[in-house]
Image: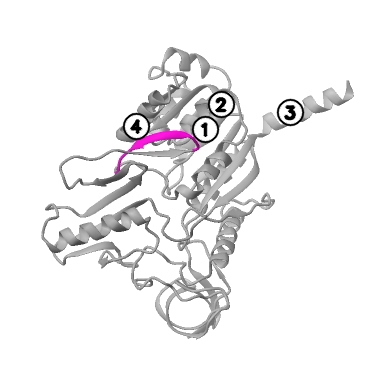
Amino acid sequence: MEVTIERILPGGLGLAHADGKTVMVPLAAPGDRLRVRVDRVKGSVSFAQIEEILTPSPLRVEPPCPYFGRCGGCDFQQMNYQAQLDAKVEIIKDCLRRLGGIENIPEFQILAAPNPWHYRSRAQWQYDAVRQKLGYFERASRNVCDVAECAVLAPELQKTLESLQTGMQAGLLPDGVRDFRVVVGDDGISISPPLDGKLAHITRTIRGETYRLNAESFFQANDGLLPELVNAAIGEVRGETALDLYCGAGLFTLPLARRFKQVVGAESDPAAANFARDNLTNARLTNAEVIQSDVGVWLEALRFGDSSKLSEESATALQGPIDFMLLDPPRTGAESRVISGVLGLKPQRISYVSCDPATLARDLKKLIAGGYTLTSVRAFDMFPQTHHVETVVQLVSWFQKVDSTLCRRTVSRS
């Protein structure tokens, strides 16, 4: 079958139409004319693989990585960098319109990565001890693609990968390990499981704040864009009370504590919650605390007046209106009960940081239906060479917006 790729869809697949059918093609570029082989059909949609590039798109480039197409890590290397950025903007708009039902999307642009290569400061490598392979899963497979060099790894992690490869060949890697997680910091590398019996801690400095963490803790993987991401998520807001949901090691909690009188973070992972507490203590920020709890369960308890896990100061502060709430959920988005908890607490402003436009759009639809207005959208290319994109949106309570408008009218009349 011959097809021409029209555009890139959420998930990174190229969209084409042929013989009255919708065709999805991975690793394509808009404008490619391709000969494809259909692998499977689901309803009216055919999923196909490229057999031959008949006429390459002007946006197509030669992928520099020898593992491209086999390794499941990168799926945008076939497009020049500007085309990648343009595709991600359209992916966000498509999700907001189609899944979120949002027609009047605020104008936005995407902030390019300072370096679209060698940017990843965190990685997870799969290990197949039987076949002696170390790297990433192959595309659409659980087989390990043995990778000697990764084009998106920070140089320090590339050296760590090479060291592990050497250890694998010498039979020195620990038994029973299925994957290694690594993160680089200002002061070294943390790897899990550790090779010397001790899990190292590292520090990362972002916007003047110092964060302590290890390889088992989640932290953003592109340091080059983190200051701008934090700025976009927090903006110029200040006030009395703020909640930081899915706070992790405290990336947003610390700067929020410098803007608000009282801040409470919620995080389900015990290790991450402990790091967030340590980071607040080391920063000498005494007006914030972190609750280790399932976010949905904690919000529900807070909504119905159970503040037993909070200090007296926070419990008192949260009895009044919540000025600002920040959400940074995993790729699956916020659970339904989390959204219900947010709507029940009625924060005046919401900032939602998302790494998946589809789940973001799903959650925005519920928040907007619950009385919020989408006021801004910003995008960040935290994951160059892949279809993934980070989005930050701001919402304001409709009631707050109405009150502000009435106040302005009253002042102008007086």
Q: CA distance from mark 3 to mark 4?
A: 38 Å
Where's residue 153, x and y in %?
37, 58
In primary-sequence order, the first of circles 2 and 4 is: 2
| Dot label at residue 275 | 4
Q: Nearer the viewer, mark 1 or mark 4?
A: 4
Name the residue beneath numbered marker 2: 259
> What amino acid is found at the position of numbered circle 1 in the picture?
Val
Per the rendered image, the range of residues in magenta is 207-215
Where is the C terminus found, in terms of image quarters? top right
In primary-sequence order, the first of circles 3 and 4 is: 4
> What amino acid is found at the position of numbered circle 2 in the picture?
Arg
Q: CA distance from mark 1 to mark 4?
A: 25 Å
Name the residue beneath numbered marker 1: 342
* Residues at discs 1 and 4 in contact (Cβ within 8 Å): no
In primary-sequence order, the first of circles 3 and 1 is: 1
Q: CA distance from mark 2 to mark 1?
A: 21 Å
In primary-sequence order, the first of circles 2 and 1 is: 2
Which SS class for mark 2? loop
> What amino acid is found at the position of numbered circle 3 in the picture?
Ser
Name the one closer to the observer, 93 or 151: 151
| Dot label at residue 45 | none
In primary-sequence order, the first of circles 1 and 4 is: 4
Crowding near the residue tagged with mark 2, few <14, some 14–19, many ≥20 C-alpha atoms within 10 Å: some
| Dot label at residue 404 | 3
Q: Residue furthest right?
A: 413
* Residues at discs 2 and 4 in contact (Cβ within 8 Å): no
